Each structure stands twice: as C-alpha cells, then as structure tokens.
Amino acid sequence: MLKSPDPSLINDDIRPLAPEERTWGAGSMASLWVGMVVCVPTYMLAAGLIEQGMSWWQAVLTVLLGNLLVLVPMILNGHPGAEYGVPFPVLARASWGIRGAHIPSVLRALVACGWFGIQTWLGGAAIYQLLGVLLGAEALGGAPLPALDINAWQLGCFLGFWLLQVGIVYKGVESIRLLELYSAPFLILMGLALLGWAYVRADGFGEMLSAPSQFAPGGPKEGRFWEVFFPSLTAMVGFWATLSLNIPDFTRYARSQRDQVLGQALGLPTTMTLFAFIGVAVTSATVTLFGEAIWDPTVLLGKMGGGLAVGVSLFALTIATLSTNIAANVVSPANVFINLSPQRVTFTQGAMITAVIGLVICPWKLMESTGGYIFTWLIGYSALLGPIGGVMIADYFIVRRTRLDLEGLYREQGPYTFSGGVNWVAVGAFVVAVAPNVPGFLSAAGVLTEVAGVWKTLYTYAWFVGFGLAAALYALGMRLTGAAAR
C-alpha cells in the first residue's frame, strides 16, 4: 500500500496492483494476443508484400521477423508493468515527469480512439453482411440518411456493434480478459477451418504458393529485394508499435515476469505468422476457385455460398473484430483519460469517452474521404511511437536499472517532479528523434513533392531511427544533467 499519495495522481484504477491481484498467467497473456492479432488487417498483411514482388514465403517470413523484432520492446516495456503493477501512463511519469507523462500517453490515446471507430465500423459492416445473408440483401437497402451518407440498416449495425462493446467494457478489465480467453481458441479453430475449406475446394492451395519471387534472377524486379524488404519490415514493426508502448496496461496483471514473457512470445509472433499464412494460402486458392485473388475476407465470404457457412464465418469475423478492438483500442485511452483527472474519471468512464469519440468521428466518412491516406498516417505514426518507446526503455533499463520509486510515481513533489512536473530531457530527445522522419512522412503523405533522397531513406526506417536516436539522446542527456539523481 502507498503511504501518502497525492489524490490528484491516483484512483483505484491506476494504483499499483498488489501481488495477489495479479492473476494473469502465461495462458491469459497468450490469449490476449491471439484475440488482438486475429483481425482483417492481419489476414491481409502479406497481400501488400506479395504485390510488391515477394514470394509467399518471403512475405510470411517478413511478417515473422517484424513481429520478433517488436516482441523485444514489447517484453522490455512489459517488465515494469509486471514488476510494479502500474499502467502505462503512470510508468511514463518516471521518464517524462508527473505532468510531462501526458505527452506520450495522449499521443498514444489519440490513435487508439481513431482505430476504435474504424474497427467498430468494420465490425458493424460484418453484422450488416450477416443480416444480408439471413434476410436477403434487398431487405437491407434504403436511401442514405441525411448528413450521414449511410442507410438506416448500416447505422443500426454500427450502433449495435458499438453498444455490444460498450456493454463489455462497462464491466471492467476482467470482462476483457474473459472475452480474450474464450475467443482465442474459437478464432484459431475458425482460421484453420477456413484454411481447410480452401484446400479441399481448390484441390490444393493453387498457383500463388508456387509463384517465384519477382526479385529472383531473371524476374521483373531482379536485385531490388532489399529496397522492398526494409520498408516492409518497418511497417511490420509499426503494426504493433502502439501496443509496445502501453503493454504495461496488461502486464501489470501478470503473475510473474515469466508469465508476461512466455505469454507474449507464444501469442504474438506465432499467431501473426499463422494468420498471415492463412491469408496467403486462402487467397491463393481463390484464384483457382473464382478466377481472381480475393484478399478481403469479407468479400470472400460473400462468394462462398451457403447461408450457414457464411453466417458462421461472419460471426467469427465479428468476434475477431470485437476482441481486437476492445483490447487494443479501449484499455490504453481509458487509462490515459484516468491519468488526466484521476479524481473525476474511472476506467469505465474513460472507456465511455473512448467509445463516444469513436462514434462521433463518423469513421465511415473518415475511411471514405481519405482512402489509403489514413493508413499512411497510421503507419507514419511509428515515427512518433518509436521515440516514445526509446525514451521509456532507456529510462527504465539504462538510467534507473529497473529501480523505480513507487511512492514517487504518485507524488507531486518527489523524484519525478523534474521542472514543473516535466522532464525536458525526455521532451527534447523526443523532438530531436522525430525531426529526421518528418520530411519523409510529409513526402509519403503527399504534402511535399520534392524531398531529398536521404530523408526518404531515413523514413524507410522510421521506427528504428526514432527509437535508437531517442534512447541514446535521453540516456546521454540524463547523465549530463544529472536529472535522475534529483
């Protein structure tokens, strides 16, 4: 128990958990990852790599390598959560300051709120298609509603899926753990069933799995493999860069360091690789079955035929979206909103704020108006997330050697007050580490048309550049200023 925490920095949701409250074993941690990994973006992850010229095994191997790399900061950042029982926004106080912690936590929360809305729309779309199978597509028509540009059925499905998520998160983190625990085996089973269906119907997996790499000798992109590989690897790391920051929100419930390490190692890279392969193999079979490569599983389900099969598959798709969205895009912003005002906001209220933001942004308009542009923004977000991770990991392992003053994390005046509650060394390291990636990002987003090649090359490694530069600058700055000793 903390002796005298400042009320403005604590409530029951962000206090350090006692050892007896940490009940998640390796199985729970692995199930969490299975539930988050199995979603439409994961299924389609290898598509872009194959379109760039990779063979199927090169694409799947790139996915595996990227997730093995991101597993490292995931486990490192998960260590203080399991060791001290504190969530991400509280942990950030050690490196950024009591007030400065709002900078990384709010940046993390904003992208989560956007993703929550997008995934909610995708989940509602799955329900809409399921109803189309049961009632007939003609029954779900109707003119678009004024100002919304979607019909009443689409809005109803979106709101229905939104309310389903609200009902789950209203009951707290334990309900989220149970959702992930029970959905994990079902989702794996459904993925394997889809793989088996494709193999049997197509009498094999088709020609895509035997197609050579375009980078092979004599191929149309001979000798250009590394030009594609490294940007793709950065994108794979960026896929879970968000969770590599707020993973303490979950590891704080782990029974031990062994449970958080083993659970994450079993759940993340293995499931990502498996479902990337399922996406490739099933899509390869669709070339034989339908005469074209169908990467989008929602489109594929509409061509499968048979009401029961489509109904079960779309139900699985709904569960997959639900389990991913709640764990990946609700817990983090909820804790951030708590940290902004612990005396006024609880976990349930923070989750409701997240849900409302995801609702009012009208995510279908966001996706329609920006198309692929939004994904440029979200992938480019790794240029911000890498430096944040670099600062926090350097602080915990290099500067403090894993020793935190738990009482000080909850005191206005203490070791993490720094200057007015802000550690300007962390802020400076973050700004300098982000700067080299800004020109490349603006070029990728289409804002700038003329950018020197060196900036585009640096942006290719955005997460790695930001992470390494921020970690080095922070460690050096803390040593030169002696800020950690104050």
Image (cartoon, rainbow, N blue to C red):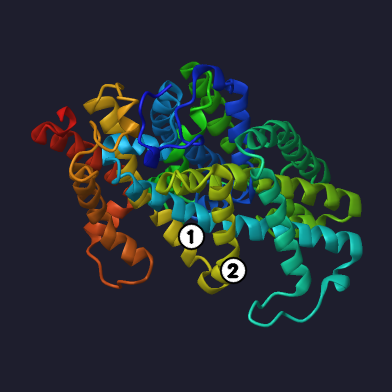
Which residue is at the far left? Answer: 480
Q: Quadrant of the N terminus?
A: top left
Percent coordinates x, y for residue 262 in the rendering: 52, 21
Residue 279 location (% of width, % of height): 65, 46
Image quarter for residue 439?
bottom left
Disc 1, SS: helix
Crowding around mark 2 (Cα neighbors within 10 Å: few <14, some 14 to 19, many 20+) is: some
In this rendering, does residue 21 appear at all? Answer: yes
For the image, the number of numbered tags is 2
List the residue tagged with mark 1.
375
Q: Quadrant of the C terminus?
A: top left
Q: Which residue is mark 2?
A: 362
Of pointers 2 and 1, the one earlier in the residue sequence:
2
Q: Nearer the viewer, residue 467 or 234?
A: 467
Kind of residue sitting beneath label 2: Cys
Q: Is mark 2 in CB contact (under 8 Å) with mark 1? A: no
Residue at image position (36%, 31%) is 5
